[in-house]
Amino acid sequence: MQKVIFIGLGTMGYHMAGHLSKNKNIELSVFNRTIEKAHKWHSEFTKDIVTSLKEQIQNFDIIILCAGRDEDIEEIFFDANNGIANNIKQSAIVIDHTTISYGMTLKLSNKLIAKNINFIDAPVSGGEIGAKNGMLSIMAGGSKNKIAQVEPILNSYAKNITHMGQVGTGQLAKMANQICITGVLQGLSEALIFAEENNLDIDKLLSAISGGAAGSWQMENRLKTMHKKEFDFGFAIKWMIKDLSYTLNQAKQSNLDLELTQQVYEKYKNLANKGCENFDTSALVLHKKK
Ligand SMILES: NC(=O)c1ccc[n+]([C@@H]2O[C@H](COP(=O)([O-])OP(=O)(O)OC[C@H]3O[C@@H](n4cnc5c(N)ncnc54)[C@H](OP(=O)(O)O)[C@@H]3O)[C@@H](O)[C@H]2O)c1
């Protein structure tokens, strides 16, 4: 039976590892930097907790991560004292669900592939609710055969796995996803401000336009909460700032000017400076015109 470790029991990883714990074809262990979270997870799902990642990582055939950002991946793999890169066994498969930059993805994959370790970049979309329901979408980059091999494992928490191409294309697809979201939210914010200014009934507006060409997931799921100024849930602005910084940096490398994405990025930084960094990204509507 394949030995699998899931690293990072945060907002997303806690649920993803929870679904994975029910997969009877693997032997699962988990690791979390803050051990209390691992204990909480263990009390719910019972599988083993790894306490010393560097010493125990060599026991695993498949290593799955869902950490936060570039710096976390750097620390987990390359920290001078505790980095795991040199202890992973040959021919293991590393699957990274963290949204990180293209540059960091290539740095990590190049180091691992040189040691005969397989690497799949596999950022996710679907948010906490998608993780809770095991309905995430995965954009995967790497060897087609290796992705096919781990698909039954990823299916524990994903409804849709798309092989985008070579290593890094998963992260590039996630960047395209975030560009789309910023554009939709900016349009939705302006439409809501306009509708409120003109005293339109927002419930009626939603029912009138959500089924047509203007409709979107954001409109269906966020227009009413934006109107009620409820933002204490969902995908945090601080995460979107991180993702857009990777995206804009990547665009710059090909001399692309992503005008709207840049504007929305500045607005999110502004909102974060005003204390809204943990609000859902639909709080873009707070960045008013006046
Ligand atoms: N939240 C969403 O709706 C959502 C949606 C799509 C994609 N994503 C992406 O998914 C990733 C995870 O998001 P999340 O919301 O689950 O984040 P989170 O709640 O902050 O969880 C991050 C996890 O990574 C661990 N970690 C961070 N740095 C580490 C380090 N240096 N060494 C070891 N462990 C480390 C944290 O451990 P500790 O417990 O010790 O802090 C925590 O378990 C991010 O890249 C995010 O952009 C999130």
Image (cartoon, grey):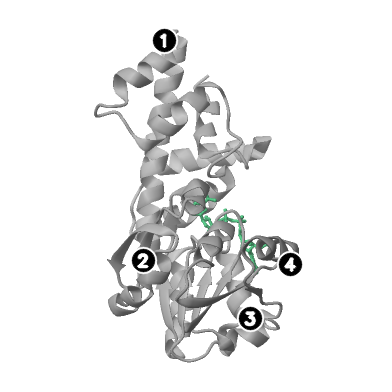
What SS does tag 1 mark? loop
Q: Where is mark 3, residue-wise?
A: 83
The outermost residue toward the left is 213
Residue type at mark 1 is: Leu
The mark found on residue 140 in the picture is: 2
Nearer-the-camera pick, 206 or 75: 206
Which residue is located at x 52 percent, y 36 percent? 267
Residue 277: % across, % down: 62, 42
Which residue is located at x 46 percent, y 72 percent? 95
The answer to whether residue 251 of the structure is visible from this angle is no
Residue 93: % across, % down: 44, 81
Residue 150: % across, % down: 38, 74
- Choose the circle earlier in sequence order: 2 or 1: 2
Q: Where is mark 4, residue-wise?
A: 35
Nearer-the-camera pick, 154 or 237: 154
What SS does tag 2 mark? strand
